[in-house]
């Protein structure tokens, strides 16, 4: 059984509607104005849930997103035949987390950006956390609501972000993540990112199992 | 500070595909100083200015995608194992996936193109095509994607239930990415004329794909150490103090011990990054010869780390390392090897890549 202790978590959203300008303006206030002007919605949401991190270079980040910078992707495609350098830049994975780390000038040794289907990305991300080697690791995830391409599931249909701080030490922990790597014959649990963020509010015990990822259990102290 | 686990693994198999062909064909063309790049329309069948590209086949929007026959060619040598099961997991990395299909969909709304329009849909489609299982992690980290995939694959091998790991990486060009780099004004529109007058330098792009089978058992070629570092200084520039290159070099330096190494660097053609890479590596690695093959193959983007690893292994097998094609003196530092050289006296290779956001990845390979 492999364990990591949950020290803290933060979340924002989910928002099913398009966010209004005042709300976005508030998110931007957490960054230098010149940088904030060019930041994507997803990066602003991620910045909000990461703002209290005391990130050290030897910490590890697992960054998980299925649709990433969907709005930049849509805008970039629309910009042809004169492609937009800003939207191209912002659409390159893992732009969301990088915009935040760059704005805050926070270098880090290990950043693992993973993508995946909505039904398995959480399991993949939790497994990646269990493979981190440093004392502190962070799972950071988010999506931004798209426009025209959300109808064909290329961009997401809601916006949110969350961060979970894990540690190998249980001092001041608020919860625990346990993992049995072996496969199981039980039915695979399906949990999407959109579901997982709602779970974080409930603080109930959560068991997840999948033939490819083993068995996870989240408990709260 | 946490002690670094070097993530030592054996490389059981490593193969690549470029515009020249497989790793053997690619290697021999590099030794012969051939250039795979051709001046081609940036938007492919949609025209546009000429830029240097190396393509395995014509850059056209088709369904099935133009790259599926290329993946069949690459994976025809894939060892027969139950890939995609928990004991034989797969990591697929790219900075493109099926973005050519997404671009095509945005032009003509043909629903066939949706099957590969996102990274996970592309991986599902490819997995079905090659009958791979679903124990798969998808990694995308711009031009260090395949390096990060190798690092993560090595971590998976630390679990006793994992026997071997398949790392597969592919990047096939499309107007989406060629147009994107064109918009950044860093593609050499004057190719094949040199771009020496361009203030920021210039790059070329290329198709590239590769796979590696990683084993916890010692093999003829092994990764002795691999790590990453993210400067997070600027999205499109390295820290001008060179700390990114110095840090990544210093992270791997302790593992070299008394090995004599040559270096395959990133070397895309951008002047500032090239100057930092060559001068800092000259300093950290005490003048070890430095080569880059992107002047012939183009930058194969997310797959460049794994493509160039396959070529480095061919170089080891043939006792000769291809030089840096497409460059001429004066270089930024004396360690840059323009011509091919015998590598019999060396017993290790350092391979380095870097990406937007100041992401760096490096590995040390050794061999018997």
Image (cartoon, coloured by chain):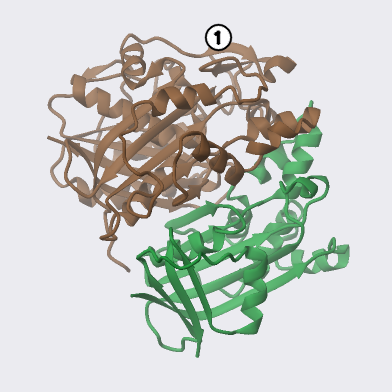
Mark 1: few/some/many CA within 10 Å (<14, 14-19, 20+): few
Q: From the top left corner, tell me how far across and down residue B149 is, in percent.
A: 41, 46
Say left or right for A29 vs B56.
Answer: right
> Which chain did the renderer colour green?
A
Chain in brown (letter): B
Where does residue B318 sit, x and y in percent of width and height? 20, 19
Question: At 63% across and 26% down in the image, what residue appears?
Answer: B174
Q: Which residue is mark 1?
A: B193
Q: Quadrant of the C terminus of chain B?
A: top left
Residue A194 visible to the viewer = yes
* Residue B317 point in image, percent of width and height: 20, 23
**Picture quadrant of residue B23:** top left
Residue A163 relative to residue B93: left or right: right
In the foreground, A96 or B247: A96
In the rendered view, does B6 fall on the left or right side of B110? left
Is A92 placed left or right of B276 in the picture? right
Is disc 1 placed on a helix, strand or loop?
A: loop
Badge count: 1
Where is residue B47, by image quadrant?
Answer: top right
Q: For the N terminus of chain B, give its image quadrant.
A: bottom left
Which chain is mark 1 on? B
Residue at the spot x=44%, y=32% of the render? B304
Task: Give percent across and percent down for residue A188.
Answer: 51, 64
On the question of residue B48 being in view, the answer is no
Does residue B222 lie above or below A134 as drawn?
above
């Amino acid at each position: 059984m492999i364990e990591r202790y949950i020290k803290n978590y933060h979340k924002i959203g989910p928002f099913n509607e398009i966010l209004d300008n005042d709300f976005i303006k508030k998110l931007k206030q957490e960054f230098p104005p010149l940088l904030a002007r060019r930041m994507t919605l997803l990066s602003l949401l991620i910045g909000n849930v990461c703002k209290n991190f005391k990130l050290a270079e030897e910490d590890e980040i697992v960054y998980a997103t299925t649709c990433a910078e969907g709005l930049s992707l849509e805008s970039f495609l629309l910009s042809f035949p004169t492609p937009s350098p800003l939207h191209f830049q912002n659409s390159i994975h893992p732009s969301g987390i990088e915009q935040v780390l760059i704005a805050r000038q926070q270098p880090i040794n290990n950043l693992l950006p993973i993508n995946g289907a909505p039904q398995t990305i959480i399991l993949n991300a939790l497994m990646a956390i269990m493979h981190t080697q440093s004392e502190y690791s962070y799972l950071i995830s988010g999506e931004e609501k798209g426009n025209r391409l959300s109808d064909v599931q290329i961009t997401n249909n809601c916006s949110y972000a969350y961060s979970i701080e894990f540690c190998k030490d249980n001092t001041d922990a608020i919860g625990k993540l346990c993992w049995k790597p072996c496969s199981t014959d039980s039915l695979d649990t399906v949990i999407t990112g959109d579901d997982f963020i709602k779970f974080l509010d409930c603080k109930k015990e959560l068991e997840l199992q999948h033939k490819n990822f083993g068995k996870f259990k989240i408990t709260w102290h | 500070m946490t002690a670094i686990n070097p993530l030592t693994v054996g490389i059981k198999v490593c193969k690549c595909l470029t515009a020249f062909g497989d790793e053997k064909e690619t290697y021999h063309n590099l030794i012969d100083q051939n250039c795979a790049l051709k001046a081609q329309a940036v938007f492919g069948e949609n025209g546009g200015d000429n830029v240097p590209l190396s393509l395995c086949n014509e850059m056209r929007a088709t369904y099935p995608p133009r790259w599926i026959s290329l993946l069949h060619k690459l994976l025809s040598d894939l060892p027969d194992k139950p890939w995609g099961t928990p004991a034989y997991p797969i990591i697929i990395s790219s900075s493109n996936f099926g973005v050519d299909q997404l671009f095509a969909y945005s032009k003509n709304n043909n629903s066939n193109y949706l099957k590969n329009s996102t990274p996970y849909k592309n991986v599902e489609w490819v997995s079905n095509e090659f009958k791979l299982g679903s124990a798969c992690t998808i990694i995308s980290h711009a031009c260090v994607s395949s390096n990060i995939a190798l690092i993560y694959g090595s971590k998976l091998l630390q679990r006793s239930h994992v026997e071997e790991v398949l790392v597969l990486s592919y990047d096939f060009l499309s107007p989406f990415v060629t147009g994107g780099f064109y918009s950044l004004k860093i593609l050499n529109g004057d190719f094949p004329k040199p771009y020496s007058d361009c203030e920021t330098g210039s790059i070329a792009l290329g198709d590239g794909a590769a796979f590696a089978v990683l084993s916890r058992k010692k093999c003829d070629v092994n990764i002795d150490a691999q790590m990453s570092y993210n400067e997070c200084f600027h999205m499109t520039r390295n820290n001008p103090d060179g700390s990114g290159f110095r840090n990544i070099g210093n992270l791997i330096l302790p593992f070299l011990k008394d090995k004599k190494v040559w270096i395959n660097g990133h070397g895309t053609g951008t002047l500032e990054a090239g100057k930092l890479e060559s001068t800092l590596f000259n300093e950290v690695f005490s003048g070890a010869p430095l080569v880059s093959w992107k002047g012939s193959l183009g930058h194969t983007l997310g797959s460049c780390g794994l493509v160039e690893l396959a070529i480095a292994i061919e170089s080891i097998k043939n006792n000769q390392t291809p030089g840096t094609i497409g460059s001429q003196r004066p270089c930024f530092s004396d360690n840059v090897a323009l011509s091919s050289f015998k590598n019999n006296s060396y017993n290790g290779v350092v391979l380095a890549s870097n990406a937007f956001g100041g992401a760096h990845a490096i590995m040390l390979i050794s061999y018997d």
